Image (spheres, rainbow, N blue to C red):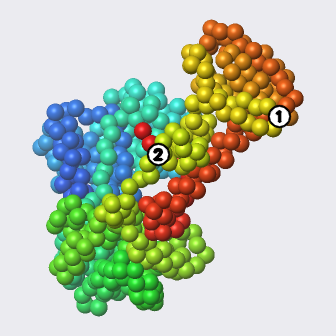
Amino acid sequence: MSNSDNAPALPTSEVSGKAQSYLVLARKYRPQTLDDLIGQDILVRTLRNAFAMDRIAQAYMLTGVRGVGKTTTARILARALNYERDGLPDRPSLDIAELGRHCQAIMDSRHVDVLEMDAASNTGIDDIREIIEAVRYKPAAARYRVFIIDEVHMLSKSAFNGLLKTLEEPPPHVKFIFATTEIRKVPVTILSRCQRFDLRRVEPEVLSAHFARILEKEGYAADDSALALIARAAEGSVRDGLSLLDQALTMAEGRLTAASVLDMLGLSGRDAIFDLLERIFDGDAAGALTALGALNERGADPTLIISDVADAVHALSRLKVLPGAYPHDLSADDRARADRLAASLPVPRLAMAWQMLLKGIDEAARAPRPLAAAEMLVFRMCYTAQLPSPADVIGELKRSGERAPVRDSASSAPARDSAAGASATSGGFEPARSRVLSSRGSEAVAAEAPREAARSFASFEEIVEKVRAARDIMLQKALEERVELVKFGPGFLELRLLEGAPQSLAPELAKKLQAWTGERWIVSLSEERGLPPLGARMRDEKAQAKEEIRKHPAVKSILHHFPDAEITDVRKLD
């Protein structure tokens, strides 16, 4: 909830007996006018223009995170819509610094014509029927009947449907104001009938200045760094920040200091975080664990420590591209240290650290022993800090003059051809296509394909490739795994069927070959043993190719620097 620096305390309804009971800062400094809102300049400017031009919407949708001022803004709007004071025109106005005829009752949530409903506890169609029934009646005292529905996203589907017609064409004396933290859960049919305002998170610098003004009014002194820590912990929520400020003041002994705020929040100072980060990037596992343990002994939660380290890595990364863009809570000494760290760390190392920290935050949050999870994360980060980056390895290889293996001549052995850069296709390893395979008995003979066969298919492998391209999955798998090639020639194919092969394979394949080539093909079946199935040969050749590649000096160097790396595929170089 946004807050006012000069807002009056709530009225006498808050008084108990003769002395007023303690009022928390979030309520004491609740905004009373749009000018009191902080961090919502766009909303204020838009509403002022709309009221000045008499373009007031029939329904408003206020959305944003907790504590940024949605409900407060709704009440201010209700006051403005019904603002009446002697000597002023009878029209809505946002100039409501002085209390009007209805203002006090609206601020106390007790005005008969301004009805507030919490949709979290009134979710059903029956609750909406009460509103629809009340809409029919004109206001009893004020200018408009205003319905404020908080957490509107929690209404049921039937409740939303029941509200649609009334929301689209409400009587002229009715205004709706909705507030929600989950705008995506509100049906688009409802959103399309409302004027939407997205209330922003308040910037830490704005929050810190706001807290300083409030403490001055309250008669307290505080260090700027202490207020900056509270503003950072509030994450853009004014209400959360004021609640933390209330808590911190109970620990202040004359002056609110950064040390007392750190103890209260269980956070770690920037200096200690930079110490931990330096040891991690230096690969000093022992020193990093000692620094982590010291922070934990001071009461810092391990998950928050990791989160603070991630914030520091983010700050250093921003400094790499935006020099001088320091977080607002950094002291002069911390800024100088951040500059030194940012200058010494390359972007890839910062990016890798960021990814590891994000994963580590989740691990620590779910772990039965968060400190153990944090320590394991530090171990991993220290280990990876000692490894060269891929760019460093590639640069080292280039400087050493190593070259990638060159493909042997066509007369080389098939296995060596494959190792030098065999081709991979969607179906697996693709062997050389310039051979014709035939078999007599148990001996396989390789012969050059006749020239005239080049007009159709030069090899059995080309036939399988064509079947694969035609997306005939069943036939492709049968030819790769369920047959042995016995003989191959122009317009002729002899195969041995293995277990699981379809009996219709031969006539089906012959028909397809004739359709593809325009020539008559004979596909016969044989009991003779042929070459091993094509799929088995492809797998063997790929395994041989991987072994040949593994022996190359360049690959051996990469595997040495990255022992967990694997060769997953071998492809032909273009």
Element marked by disc 1: loop
Q: Percent x, y for residue 508?
A: 75, 17
Give the quadrant of residue 482.
Answer: top right
Give the residue displayed 27% in from the left and 85% down from the top. Answer: 257
Task: Say which quarter of the image contains residue 289.
Answer: bottom left
Q: Position of residue 450 (x, y in %)?
A: 61, 20
- Observer-side mark, 1 or 2, equals 1
Q: Left or right: where does residue 446 sit relative to residue 62?
A: right
User: With respect to residue 165, does 142 lie above or below?
Assistant: below
For label 2, the SS is loop
Above or below residue 545? Residue 238 is below
Residue in the image at 62% along x and 13% along y: 516
**Considering the image in quadrants, where does the N terminus appear?**
bottom left
Q: Does residue 458 sit above or below 106 in this rendering?
A: above
Q: Please, what is the three-letter code of the amino acid marked with disc 1? A: Gly
Viewer-side residue, 214 vs 394: 394
- Give the amino acid at mark 2: Arg
* Mark 1 surroundings within 10 Å by alpha-carbon count, few (fewer than 14), some (14 through 19), many (20 or more): few
Does residue 417 appear to the left or right of 89 in the view shown?
right
Residue displayed at 52% across by 31% down: 161
Q: Which residue is mark 2?
A: 407
Percent x, y for residue 346?
A: 29, 66
Q: For this view, does 143 lie left or right of residue 120? A: left
Which residue position holds label 1?
A: 441
> Label 1 vs label 2: CA separation?
33 Å
In terms of depth relative to the viewer, which is nearer, 27 or 544? 544
Confirm whether residue 41 shows in the render. Answer: yes
Between 308 and 64, the one lying in front of the other is 308
Rate crowding at label 2 as few (under 14), some (14 to 19) or many (20 or more) other CA atoms within 10 Å. Answer: some
**Residue at horizontal 21 percent and vertical 60 percent from the top:** 321
Residue 399 point in image, percent of width and height: 30, 63
